[in-house]
Image: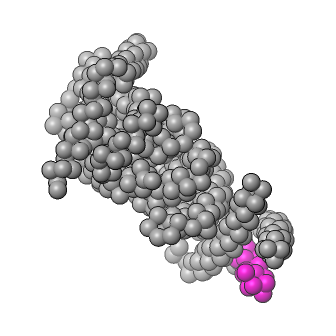
Amino acid sequence: MGGPTWVTAVNLVIWTGIFLYLLRLERRVNDLERER
Amino acid sequence: MSSGWTAEAAAVFAKDWRAERRARHAVATLVLFAITTLVIASLALGPIGATPGERSDVASALLWILLLFAAAAGLPRVFVHEEESHTATVLRLAARPSAVFAGKLAWVASLLALLEAVATPLALALFDLPVASPGRLVLALGAGGAGLAAATTLLAAIVAQGRGATTLFAALAFPLLVPLAVLAVAATRAALGGGDAGGVLVQLFLYDSTIMVAGFLLFPVIWAP
Amino acid sequence: MKRPLLWLLWGWMATVIVAAFHWAPLAEGFLGQSSRILFFHVPMAWVSFVAFMVAGVRSLAYLAGRRTERRDQAAAAAIEIGLLFALLATVTGAIWARIMWNSWWNWDPRQASIVVALLFYAAYLALRAAVADREARGRLCAAYATLGLVVAPFFYFVLPRLGFTLHPEAVINAQGKVEVEPRMLVVLLASSAGFTALFFWMHQLRTRLALREARLLEGSD
């Protein structure tokens, strides 16, 4: 049944998206702090 | 040392009552609000043939809603007028923070007690309520009132230093007062209808104590600089 | 935070997600696959509590010790993120309530309690916005968050049980004894650990960002 697999895939995509966003934020904050 | 503290607290209390007797602001507002609300509710609910149990349920909830809203309407400015009239500085010099808190707390508590004394008999009459345990009713009103007074005084002190005191007060007060109201309503209901009020009263006392202790500990910081 | 650790976090949570839907068994008494929500709903609620406790501890440190900008911003950041997780927990809870009892909201004691906590900490943000003077703002917000330190445990752990005894309807407190199956417990704990780590990372980022913003504002005076 595609049910759980589909939900899992969606969740993984969402999680990876959040993760990459936070990584980018981390990079930006690092840059800001290095400026000082 | 402690007699000095008591004198300071008593002085704060007396000052506020003196000012109140001159202006008659707070008491009038609160009492008017209480009477109006009870009358309207009684009129609206009258035609609905409710059983004594149902009336007790409704009246208990109504009474505490009334007390909460009256407090939120009439009491946020307890400290604001001190800041505005610049008596705050004098107060900070003349009395210890804990004494100021105690004095203000007593003032708020006495106002609420007065309000309860007016609203409760009126509610009992208008809703034709049975009173299974008068003693427990007094305890419920007292404990609920004390908690309400403590929370109100503490929050009034916080909002006095910000903008938009009354609105901010409502935002801060609601979350803190909801559990108190839930407990107080339950205790009142039990006292009127004859259920088990004991356990609830204990929890009410505990909640009150927590807020009061937190209030005494945090007030000096809030009153501060 | 170190890059390898972060990728480890990604892997950890990815594994949790897969395990939640494919490895963990279903719980008894739940409709269909709906018990799987618990692997996200419970940790998020837990993390929101952790967040509020962090805010309370930082605020207490602020008041009792040195009143640094960092402590003030750390408390505010913790509360912001705590609110986010609390909101997510509420929403996932409502979704699950809808599945189980066909009603999004019925003021079940647990639902009511998390709402009260949400309102309490939302009020913190309102307070923060209302006080202009930086010294006063730090002091008052810290006092409020410290109050939260005692009050939040009451909201999270006492109030839900209180409401239960007051309302006679037989509302099944489904967050009670679910973790009987060892596999479920493992996934639940792993999920909680992952979310907690995620919180600390987000918190660190938010605090650093807030401090930068504050510096910038200062510099532009």
Q: Is residue B213 above or below residue B42?
A: below
Magenta extent: C1-17
Q: Is residue C46 above or below residue B11?
A: below
Q: Is residue C93 visible from the viewing direction of this image?
A: no
SS majority, magenta: helix
Give the percent coordinates (x, y) of residue B165: 52, 36
Q: For residue A33, which quarter of the picture?
A: bottom right
Q: Residue C220 vs residue C139: left or right?
A: right
Q: Is residue B194 above or below residue B220?
A: above
Taking depth in this image into account, of C85 and C217 the one nearest to the observer is C217
Residue drawn at the location 73% of the way across and 73% of the way down: C17
User: Does the magenta-highlighted stretch encompass residue C16?
Assistant: yes
Pinpoint residue C199: horizontal percent, then vertical percent.
65, 70
Q: Which residue is drawn at the image coordinates 38% and 52% (left, top)?
A: B219
Picture quadrant where residue C193 is located: bottom right
Residue at (36, 47) in percent of width and height: B92
In the foreground, B154 or C53: B154
Side (left or right) of C113 relative to C90: left
